[in-house]
Amino acid sequence: MSYWQSLSVFIAVAEEGSFSGAAKKLAITQPTVSFHIDNLEKNFGCPLFLRTARGTTLTIYGQTLYHNTSKVNTLLEETHNQLKAMVAGAAGKIAFGASTIPAEYILPPVIARFLKDNPGVTVSLRTGDSQTVIDSFKNGDYAIAIVGAHPGDDFDVHTLWQDEVVLVAHPDTSSQLGESPDWPAIFSRQFVSRNPSSGTMRSVAAVLESHGIPGTSFRTVLHTGGNEALKAAILNKVGVGFVSKWSVKAELEAGCLKVINLPGVQIKRNFYAVCRQPLLPTGVERFWQYLLTSAVTSG
């Protein structure tokens, strides 16, 4: 049998000290109270109450049952409150995926502002290159994905932020190339690159190919999985490399890196967001709407 309703009746009798008091508290009849207690006693095979003219008291068996069911009742009440908070959007976990540039350079202040306004919510951000994030999204690993390459026409896609991909070099290398290098001079340099599946390199390949510049023109000596490793290699003069302008703002301002002007080419792209409905719990929907209203443009 299901004990939940009978246990609620049992707890009421124990706390009220009588069957009539429990019936009044629960707004049921006294025979109904007796029915539930009788069923419990039959199922457990022991008396739960001592019935006297002055009311009822718990037996040793009843005391054990009350001690343990009170814990369950408290847990149920806490769970009820947690669910209400999740429905209200005041609690819950938000898991989403983002490609490297948004995850490392754009989203942290956005998430910080969201958490300040929603202190009961927990955010779990999973990162990877754009293709990895989209593949995980398709597999149902999370309900929201933010990537630097268009995820395809199968999704309801929203543009969040704009970006420019630039070719950067150590100042010594930049001075050797001059202010307006031609393509043969650029191709003569060693290149360091993110993996081809990254949104950055997919954008570079698409734009350059549209200008008749094949990817085989570059002499790539190092592939990296992340932007920090890529920047470190460029800073150590391993080669020049294409990076998101978001990722090198500090280095450009400090003069540690220099932008190499590309002859007749500018590489612009967007960061996109996709989601899978329904967005649950409510906090996930709230975060999604927050993302859509937080769009900014790169400086």
Image (tube, grey):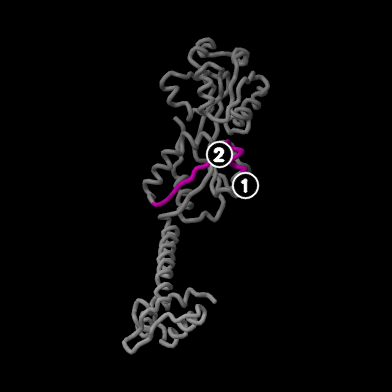
**Kind of residue at badge 1:** Lys
Which mark is on residue 138? 1
Q: Residue 60 lies in magenta, yes or no?
A: no
* Of the image marks 2 and 1, the number of the one nearer the N terminus: 1
Camera-nearest residue between 244 and 65? 65
Residue 299: x and y, percent?
A: 44, 29
Compared with residue 58, is residue 246 higher up or lower down, i.e. above or below? Answer: above
| Front-most of residues 145 and 71 | 71
Q: Nearer the viewer, residue 91 or 287?
A: 91
- Observer-side mark, 2 or 1, equals 1
Helix, strand or loop at label 1? It is helix
Question: Residue 234, image x and y in percent?
Answer: 52, 20
* Highlighted range, magenta: 120-135
As drawn, 290 above or below 33: above
Please provide percent x and percent y for residue 80.
43, 64
Q: What residue is drawn where x is 43% and y is 55%?
A: 89
Label 2 neighbour load within 10 Å: few <14, some 14-19, many 20+: many
Residue at figure coordinates x 58%, y 41% from the top left: 133
Quadrant where the image shows the N terminus: bottom right
Residue occupying the point 47% across, 82% down:
36
Q: Are marks 2 and 1 in contact (CB under 8 Å)?
A: no
Name the image quarter holding residue 264: top right
- Residue pointed to by mark 2: 147
Of all residues shown, which one is farthest toward the left? 54
Q: Residue at x 59, y 46 (%)?
A: 137
Spatial CA distance of label 2 from label 1 is: 13 Å
In the rendered image, the residue lying farthest to the bottom is 53
